[in-house]
Image (cartoon, rainbow, N blue to C red):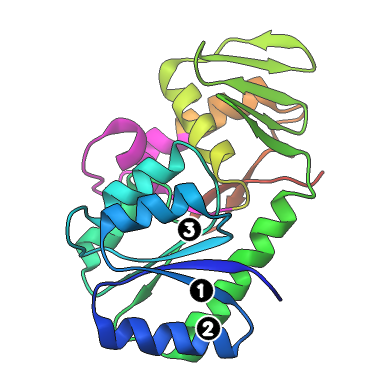
């Protein structure tokens, strides 16, 4: 174990406790105590995972997540006691992978870090790639600049909402999104529990990208929760 974790936390006591524990677990740690420092270290170091507090001086955690997601899909775990901000970071498509509610146990934190790194390592060994502004998943190529989708080299016509749903799921392979998270991210509106809009759009999207929509290969249903982009056939 030699992964490098960027720890972003302005509370010195929490920072020291977490950093010392991570080092004992075999991780390397670089430390940032505000948002600007976090972005600087991210650009300078080859970071494997970011452990991020949301309430920071100079720049808040959600802004950091948004900026990093423009360049990288590395795992980002949020540490926060503010449920509303966690919901925003996870649910509005900004791209955080998981969160740890404060106060938290160091054992739980380590387990979540290990799981996130395992998923990240799995991505690098699967038919998924983020090539500039193009995302490749199995036989699909999603061009984020030109808003086009190719399957086996042939164009697929999608509506704007279908394209946004597909892009969001593809950018976070194997990550489960609730229907509420998908709705708030794509429709930019509050979700009140009406599943019909999401269900209809997912059904139409599957009819266009799947070989057999009744046995989907790409977009898998997680019953009682939502959907995820599957990487394995």
Residue 19: x, y in percent?
44, 82
Residue 184 versus residue 25 in the image, above or below: above
Residue at which label 2 appears: 22
Q: Nearer the viewer, mark 2 or mark 1?
A: 1
Residue at point 71%, 28% (across, down)? 210
Residue at which label 3 appears: 97
The answer to whether 130 appears left or right of 105 in the picture is right
- For mark 2, give the secondary structure: helix
Residue 148: x, y in percent?
57, 13
Determine which of the numbered discs, if any, sits on residue 29 in the image: 1
Find out whether the residues at labels 2 and 1 contact each other: C-beta distance under 8 Å.
yes
Residue at point 49%, 37% (across, down)? 168
Residue 35 lies in the magenta-colored region: no
Other-residue count near label 1 (Cα within 10 Å), few / some / many at <14 / 14–19 / ≥20: many
Residue 178: x, y in percent?
43, 52
Q: Magenta segment, which residues?
A: 175-199
The answer to whether 116 appears left or right of 217 in the picture is left
Residue 93 visible in the current orientation: no
Q: Nearer the viewer, mark 1 or mark 3?
A: 1
Residue at point 77%, 12% (across, down)? 153
Measure how far apart labels 2 and 1 are at the Cα level. 7 Å
């Amino acid at each position: 174990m030699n992964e490098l974790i960027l720890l972003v936390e302005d509370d010195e006591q929490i920072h020291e406790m977490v950093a010392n524990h991570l080092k004992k677990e075999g991780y390397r740690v670089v430390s940032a105590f505000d948002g600007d420092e976090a972005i600087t270290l991210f650009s300078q170091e080859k970071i494997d995972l970011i452990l991020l507090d949301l309430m920071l001086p100079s720049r808040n955690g959600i802004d950091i997540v948004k900026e990093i997601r423009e360049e990288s899909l590395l795992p980002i775990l949020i540490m926060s006691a503010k449920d509303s901000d966690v919901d925003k970071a996870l649910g509005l498509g900004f791209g955080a992978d998981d969160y740890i509610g404060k106060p938290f146990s160091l054992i739980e934190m380590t387990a979540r870090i290990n799981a996130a790194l395992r998923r990240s390592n799995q991505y690098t060994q699967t038919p998924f790639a983020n090539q500039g502004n193009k995302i490749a998943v199995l036989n699909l190529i999603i061009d984020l600049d030109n808003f086009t989708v190719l399957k086996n080299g042939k164009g697929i016509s999608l509506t704007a909402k279908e394209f946004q749903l597909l892009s969001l799921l593809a950018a976070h392979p194997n990550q489960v999104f609730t229907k509420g998270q998908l709705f708030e991210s794509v429709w930019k509106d509050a979700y009140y529990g009406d599943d019909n809009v999401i269900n209809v759009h997912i059904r139409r999207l599957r009819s266009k990208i799947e070989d057999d929509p009744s046995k989907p290969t790409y977009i898998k249903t997680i019953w009682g929760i939502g959907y995820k982009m599957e990487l394995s056939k």
